[in-house]
Amino acid sequence: MEQTWQSETTVSDGTAVVTLFGELDIAAANPLGDVLQGAIAQSPRVQVDLARVSFIDSTVLNAFVNAHSRATDTGVSLALVNPTGHVRRVLSMTGILPMLTKPDSDD
């Protein structure tokens, strides 16, 4: 089965931006967790850009929640940014959207 998603991580000015592309399902959950853990280890602020993500399922939601917990435990701010369409609806319906889309502001 071919991989249906990709990620790209850039770090600038103390913020790691993890840009995700494609459809994230159960096959993506564990590798995504590793990508997010790597970003959390690199930077005090992590933004997960979902603008180019067209689909997520419950396993991916779990990966986001787990990453948020790990980030919080280590004093890192993690936020999901730019969710659209299906992704925004899923995040809203599950109550995850408000928890993970408000970055801790220290500006």
Image (tube, grey):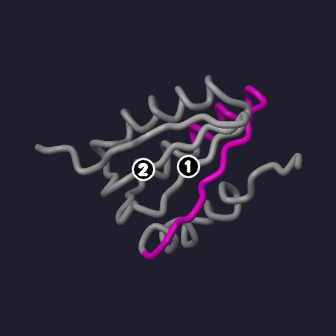
Residue underneath mark 1: 48
Q: Is residue 79 magenta?
A: yes
Image height of 8 relative to 92, above or below? above
Name the disc covering residue 65, or none. Answer: none
Closer to the camera in the image, 17 or 63 = 17
Q: Quadrant of the N terminus?
A: top left
Q: What residue is at 38 percent from the left and 34 percent from the top?
A: 30
Image height of 71 relative to 64, above or below? above
Q: Residues within 10 Å of mark 1 (few under 14, many from 20)?
A: many
Identify the amino acid type marked 1: Val
Please give left or right for residue 36 compared with residue 28 in the image: right
Please give left or right for residue 11 compared with residue 21 in the image: right
Residue underneath mark 2: 20
Start and end of the magenta stretch? 66-85
Please give left or right for residue 42 compared with residue 75 in the image: left
Residue found at the far right of this picture: 107
Identify the amino acid type marked 2: Leu
Image height of 60 relative to 73, above or below? below
Q: Residue 68: x, y in percent?
A: 64, 41
Secondary structure state at the residue bearing disc 2: strand
Q: What residue is at 75 percent from the left and 52 percent from the top?
A: 103
Q: Residue 96: x, y in percent?
A: 61, 60
Circles 2 and 1, Cβ within 8 Å, touching? The answer is yes
Q: What residue is at 45 percent from the left and 76 percent from the top?
A: 85
Q: Quadrant of residue 70?
A: top right
Q: Is residue 50 magenta?
A: no
Image height of 84 relative to 12, above or below? below
